[in-house]
Image (tube, helix red, strand yellow):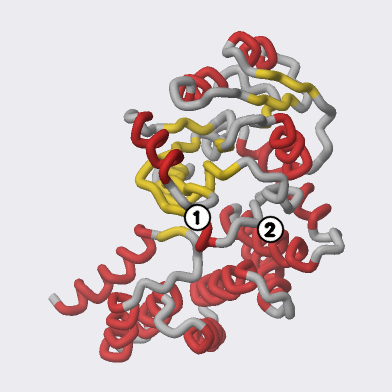
């Protein structure tokens, strides 16, 4: 774990994994509260460093201190919810994969929840090190990851600390955008677009999504941005442009659920229910997804339009 001023969250996080892990490594990046004392009282090995303005650098320093065969990475404001620890241990013992993912449950300020797959467990190998200054990721391909039913609940995206976190994230993303790695540039534009979209700053969001979408970088972040550019365009009344973008996505990702549903929604808004039904069927018959999470509320709302139209 990497932490800073987490005295309120840390006991919950540590308590949720105390019977699962054999070693706790905590890298503190400048706490002024009781975080270090709480960490040490839990039996953790604590190393204190200056904050390097780089989440990957801090995480990779923590990884260099781990000595066990498997590594589990969580944040101080996470809570591992699985109660039967023996199931986790058995899977770690028997899996042939390089990593395990869990259901990461993220409450939003509106009361809804986002659920996505989060890579939490991975083998302790020197080649597995994080990249990206923020929203860091590991270089483990999907085929090396086993999905599990275990859950990790995040407690940090709601509350009074959010404005401060958004400002920090925006600053780091703009630094990351200047990095020499092309994928870092595309990823930072995607994350900035999402942050601006959530804040209601739509022109800024569109500009960031466009930068990523029209880049020549082969990256999933380019596809994510293209999808959200289409959706945002549809929401501000640029239906024709949105349709062109959705069709581009369907051309390169036939049957993609989010793009098909986007087209269905566009036809519904235009009263073209029969055309919309065809795209709804495409979405229902396929499991190909562009985003790494399922937006249950958004998808249910679109399907609800067609259910109501048939009544």
Q: Position of residue 158 (x, y in %)?
A: 52, 37
Residue 125 quadrant:
top right
| Residue projecting furthest to the left | 311
Identify the residue at image location x=70%, y=71%.
212
Whether residue 110 is visible: no
Q: Which residue is mark 1?
A: 145
Q: Which residue is mark 2?
A: 192
Say which of marks 2 and 1 sits in front: 1
Residue 105 quadrant:
top left
Q: Secondary structure at mark 1?
A: strand
Identify the residue at image location x=44%, y=70%.
289
Tell which of 216 and 101 is nearer to you: 101
Q: Position of residue 255 (x, y in %)?
A: 40, 82
Q: Earlier in the sequence, mark 2 or mark 1?
A: 1
- Mark 1 Cα shell of 10 Å, populated few (<14), some (14-19), many (≥20): some
Q: Position of residue 67 (x, y in %)?
A: 66, 30
Image side of residue 202 versus residue 48, left or right: left
Image side of residue 202 versus residue 59, left or right: left
Q: Quadrant of the N terminus?
A: top right
Q: Is residue 230 above or below residue 244?
A: above
Whether residue 115 is visible: yes
Q: Spatial distance from mark 2 to mark 1, Cα to Cα?
A: 27 Å
Tell which of 37 and 192 is nearer to you: 37
Residue 215 quadrant:
bottom right
Of the numbered discs in the image, which one, if any, rests on residue 41?
none
Image side of residue 104 versus residue 32, left or right: left
Identify the residue at image location x=41%, y=73%.
288
- Mark 2 Cα shell of 10 Å, populated few (<14), some (14-19), many (≥20): many
Q: How many marks?
A: 2
Q: Secondary structure at mark 2?
A: helix
Q: Position of residue 248 (x, y in %)?
A: 54, 87
């Amino acid at each position: 774990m990497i932490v800073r001023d987490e005295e309120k969250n840390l006991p919950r996080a540590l308590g949720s994994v105390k019977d699962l892990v054999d070693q706790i490594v905590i890298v503190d990046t400048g706490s002024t509260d009781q975080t270090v004392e709480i960490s040490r009282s839990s039996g953790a090995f604590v190393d204190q460093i200056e904050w390097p303005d780089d989440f990957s650098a801090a995480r990779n320093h923590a990884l260099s201190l781990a000595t066990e065969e498997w590594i589990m990475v969580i944040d101080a404001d996470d809570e591992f919810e699985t109660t039967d620890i023996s199931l986790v241990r058995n899977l770690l013992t028997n899996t042939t994969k390089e990593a395990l993912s869990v259901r990461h449950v993220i409450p939003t300020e509106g009361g809804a929840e986002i659920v996505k797959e989060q890579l939490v467990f991975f083998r302790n190998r020197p080649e597995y090190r994080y990249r990206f200054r923020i929203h860091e990721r590991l270089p483990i391909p999907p085929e090396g990851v086993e999905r599990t039913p275990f859950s990790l609940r995040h407690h940090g995206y709601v509350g009074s600390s959010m404005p401060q976190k958004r400002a920090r994230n925006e600053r780091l993303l703009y630094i990351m955008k200047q990095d020499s790695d092309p994928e870092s540039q595309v990823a930072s534009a995607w994350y900035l677009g999402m942050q601006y979209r959530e804040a209601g700053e739509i022109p800024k969001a569109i500009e960031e999504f466009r930068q990523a979408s029209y880049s020549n970088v082969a990256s999933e972040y380019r596809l994510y941005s293209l999808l959200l550019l289409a959706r945002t365009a549809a929401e501000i009344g640029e239906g024709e442009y949105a349709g062109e973008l959705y069709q581009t996505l369907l051309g390169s990702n036939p049957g993609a659920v989010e793009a098909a549903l986007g087209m269905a929604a566009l036809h519904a808004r235009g009263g073209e229910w029969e055309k919309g039904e065809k795209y709804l069927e495409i979405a229902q018959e396929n499991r190909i997804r562009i985003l790494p999470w399922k937006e249950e509320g958004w998808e249910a709302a679109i399907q609800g339009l067609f259910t109501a139209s048939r009544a």
